[in-house]
Amino acid sequence: MTVTGSAVFPLGAVLRRFSSAARALGGVAILVAISMGAAVAQDEAEPFQVERIDAEWVDIDGIEYFKLRGAESISAAERVKFVEAAIIEAAELDLNKAPLVVSEPSEFGVRITADGIEITQITEGDAEYEGFELDVVAHIIVSRIEDAITAYRLGRSSGSIWEGVGSAALWTVVYAAFVTGLMKARHWQRRRVDERVHRWLQRIEEQSGRVIDATSLLQAHRMLARGALTIIIALAT
């Protein structure tokens, strides 16, 4: 009697068992790889944190007019102290006239003077901090310095030159409050909204299998917010 190979070693059964074992081992390998990849990604991922920048408000007579950031060579508090002193010095030159505040390009960005006295230099770093273009930030700060000097002189002048300008003074106060509120809203948006939007976009990125780039979407969100605020500032001024 001839014994065939298939009788002793049923090839079909062997192949089926081998295929099942291979699939099982492949599944285990994939699970291990996914687990290791997730662990590495979790170790490498850093929690999103909003950058905290050293910045202080310029305050004249208890009114906050604009915010300035610090730099490597000077803290925000020291810079603001110099700017406040310069504004007061310019305001006291002549209490009975309107201030002349001008800006001009400089080596560092934009130089702002009031009645011939240098108040501050606005740099690209300031523009980046505020979230606007350099010329827009300079325009806002020029306007706020005019408001500060006008309010300072109004409170200390003899009043003769200011007769009949009560409505203008009222508009100055209203406009100052509006711009201050807008700038504070921008800082709040950068601290709070950006953080929440970034976390939400990160979840979308993870759910999409990294098809969606959260960082690019966050940059687009910031550009839209910057554009909207720039338009509001332009319409208000």
Image (spheres, helix red, strand yellow):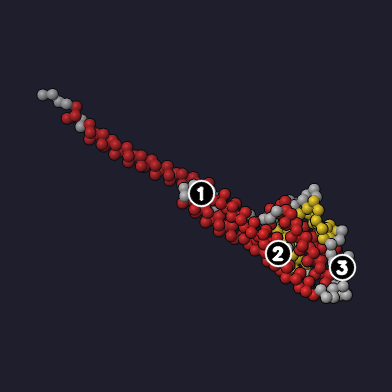
The residue tagged 3 is 97
Residue 29 in percent (x, y) is at: 38, 40
Question: Does 32 sit above or below residue 141?
Answer: above
Which quadrant is home to the N terminus?
top left
Q: Nearer the viewer, mark 1 or mark 3?
A: 3
Q: Nearer the viewer, mark 1 or mark 2?
A: 2
Foreground residue, 205 or 73? 205
Question: Does 176 sit above or below residue 208?
Answer: below
**In the rendered structure, are the residues bearing label 3 and label 2 in contact, judged by CB atoms less than 8 Å apart?**
no
Quarter of image, res 21? top left
Image side of residue 128 versus residue 160, left or right: left
Q: Residues within 10 Å of mark 2 (few under 14, many from 20)?
A: few
Tag 1, which secondary structure? loop
Q: Is residue 131 visible?
A: yes
**In the rendered structure, are the residues bearing label 1 and label 3 in contact, judged by CB atoms less than 8 Å apart?**
no
Residue 193 in percent (x, y) is at: 58, 60
Q: CA distance from mark 3 to mark 2?
A: 25 Å
Q: Nearer the viewer, mark 3 or mark 2?
A: 2
Quarter of image, res 162? bottom right
Q: Is residue 190 visible?
A: no
Mark closer to the chain start, 3 or 2:
3
Which quadrant is home to the C terminus?
bottom right
Mark closer to the chain start, 1 or 3:
3
Q: CA distance from mark 1 to mark 3?
A: 58 Å
Q: Which mark is residue 212?
A: 1
Q: Which mark is residue 236?
A: 2
